Image (spheres, rainbow, N blue to C red):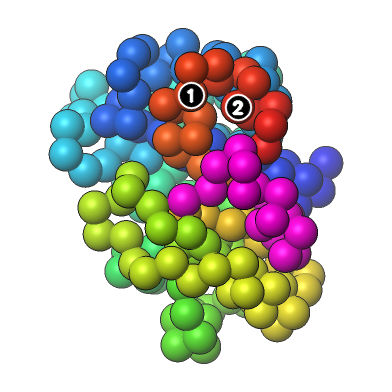
Amino acid sequence: MKLSGRLRKYLIMGSQNCERDPVDILKEAIDGGITAFQYREKGPGSLGGEAKLELGRKLRDLCRKHNVLFIVNDDSGLVEPLEADGIHVGQDDVDVQELRTLFPKKVIGLSISNEDELERSAVEVVDYLGAGPVFATSTKVDAKEAVGVEWITRVKRLHPDLPLVGIGGITVENAVEVIGAGADGVSVISAVTAASDVREAVNGL
């Protein structure tokens, strides 16, 4: 399957986003049909050290068993110990050109939230872009201002061949709008982790 297809339903999650066992939530999300998973163990209440690695291994094993793309967020030191398929970074994280040198064969994703970032970024070395936050989001403490679905359309027009994922504030109700604006996929956190029926939530995306 092409990368754009593998990014269609993209769950981002760490233990800090879960009211119950993240392994169980991921199992249900895989049953519901997620195609990609990003391990984002970051922020208040998140794990560190060996506990972070141990949870990462469990989640990676699940993804591998079900052919779900396994991406780590931000921490290049996790890519090799977790044998991740790739890494996703923001504007203030490791430079993508440096990452490409370190991981020539891994999938690299980059978040872009405005024209300035798009111009300054080495998009030619990444495999996909995350555009957003599309809508207002409460999951990230340092989230930027919502950019709307127009930003999805703009980025897709400028980089039509680069897979594009909408990020930020996406729910079962508004996901269709993001796909309609030109995104290849939608990434969600609380729309799935906080859902009363995880399988149904993923299915609705």
List the residue tagged with mark 1. 195
Asked if labels 1 and 2 touch by Cβ distance under 8 angstroms, the answer is yes
Q: Position of residue 26 (x, y in %)?
A: 51, 20
Q: Magenta residues, as a range? A: 169-185
Residue 118 in view of the camera: yes
Q: Indicate which disc, 2 or 1, sits on the residue closer to the N terminus.
A: 1
Residue 104 in view of the camera: no
| Quadrant position of the C terminus in the picture | top right
Q: Secondary structure at mark 1?
A: loop
**Mark 2 to mark 1 CA distance (whole Å):** 7 Å
Q: Position of residue 104 (x, y in %)?
A: 57, 58
Q: Position of residue 19 (x, y in %)?
A: 31, 19
* 99 to the left or right of 43: right
Q: Position of residue 9 (x, y in %)?
A: 65, 39
Q: Which residue is rendered at x = 49% and y = 35% of the image?
A: 191
Counting other residues with Cα less than 10 Å from the Cα at mark 1, is it few (<14), some (14-19), or many (20 or more)? some
Does 164 lie within the magenta span? no
Q: Nearer the viewer, residue 115 or 122?
A: 115
Q: Which residue is rendered at x = 26% and y = 42% of the image?
A: 42
Q: Which residue is rendered at x = 83% and y = 41% of the image?
A: 1
* 55 to the left or right of 121: left
Amino acid type for the residue under numbered disc 1: Ala
Counting other residues with Cα less than 10 Å from the Cα at mark 2, is it few (<14), some (14-19), or many (20 or more)? many
Amino acid type for the residue under numbered disc 2: Ala
Q: Nearer the viewer, residue 15 or 63?
A: 15
Please tell me in which quadrant of the rendered image residue 80 appears.
top left
In the figure, 190 relative to 199: above or below? Answer: below
In the figure, 129 relative to 188: above or below? Answer: below
In the figure, 184 relative to 67: above or below? Answer: below
Please tell me in which quadrant of the rendered image residue 57 appears.
top left
* 48 to the left or right of 87: left
List the residue tagged with mark 2. 201
